[in-house]
Image: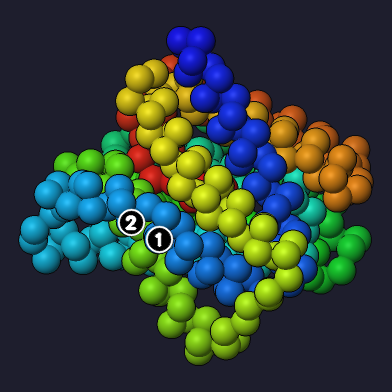
Amino acid sequence: MKKQNWMHFTILVLIWGLNWTIMKIGLRFVDPLNLVMQRLTLASIVLLPALIWKRRRLPKDCNTWLKMISLALINAAGMAFTNIGLLYETSGLSSILTYTQPLFVFCLAIPFLGEKINSTKVLGVILGFLGVTILYTGKLSSSINASNSILLLILGAFLWAVTVVYYKKLLSHIDPAIINIVQFPLGSIFLLITTLILTGLNFSSTLIYISSLFYMSIFGSAIGLTIWLLLIKEEEAIIVSTSSLLVPAVALIFGWSLLGETIEFYSLLGFLLVMIGVYLVNRHHYELKYGSSTTLHTF
């Protein structure tokens, strides 16, 4: 990797790692649906110039647009579930569970994309889900909300994986940049309707919340997406995909240092097993075919 791209990669990992702490702070002021909706709305505004610039590359047929809308709905739902889980869970543990996404991608790619099975990847999936089991059982002694939050975070990771396989299966002919830029306005519209029905609009005018919202939208989404697409264009996806291993580690450190989150032994053990599993599944250039270089939550 070029020296400049190493710098970009480091910045990206730090941005997305810190973003988990910022999201946790934002959830102190508004509910999860409002948080995600407002984040996507602001990110849409920031990315509007990029959408205008690429307008000629937007698909012209209704069938493709329907597929893109479906993809955006799945992605928005996944982000909503993740933030609901984050409300009751630590930022570090939430990031670990969300970044189990490659494990689900592999499992879904077998029936839907014809992914070949080998012993290394099977071992990776077993170790990864063993780590998830340890994280879940470690929460059983806590409140019902705490154990349920694990399930919501896993559901968010699963839906993220669905978007990757969905894109590869039905929308791989569309520029990934278009897919990722368009998902913000489409997702914000879906979440606006959902929020109005379920919770009602809620906004906090405090400086802390506004600062958090700007960070999540501008840095976590717009700038993070720009750097990611730049790296994917210039470097092998298998190298860039190591963010799946590094972002949770950085999130754990930020959560511990900035929020005072406790890192239990079972959390470290589960984290190590999940990351080893993700590494084994991602090796052999797996990401070049089906990885998260296509669709992003931009966490």
Please name the residue that numbered disc 1 is placed on: 45
Residue at image position (43%, 82%) is: 193
Residue 293 falls left or right of residue 178: right
Mark 1: secondary structure = helix
In the rendered structure, which amino acid carries the disc numbered 1?
Ile
Residue in view at x 67 percent, y 58 percent: 211
Q: Rounded to the nearest whole Å, what is the CA distance between mark 1 and mark 2?
A: 5 Å
Give the residue drawn at x 61%, y 51%.
Answer: 215
Q: Residue furthest left?
A: 61
Q: Quadrant of residue 291?
A: top left
Asked whether disc 1 touches disc 2, contact meaning CB atoms under 8 Å apart, the reply is: yes
Rendering coords of residue 39 (x, y %): 53, 62
- Residue 150: tell me if it is visible: no
For this orientation, the residue located farthest to the top is 2
Q: Position of residue 169 (x, y in %)?
A: 25, 46
The image shows residue 246 at horizontal and vertical percentages of: 64, 29
Residue type at mark 2?
Leu
Label 2 CA crowd tier, 10 Å (few <14, some 14–19, many 20+): some
Task: Tell me the tag on residue 248.
Answer: none
Q: Position of residue 230 (x, y in %)?
A: 38, 29
Mark 2, residue position? 48
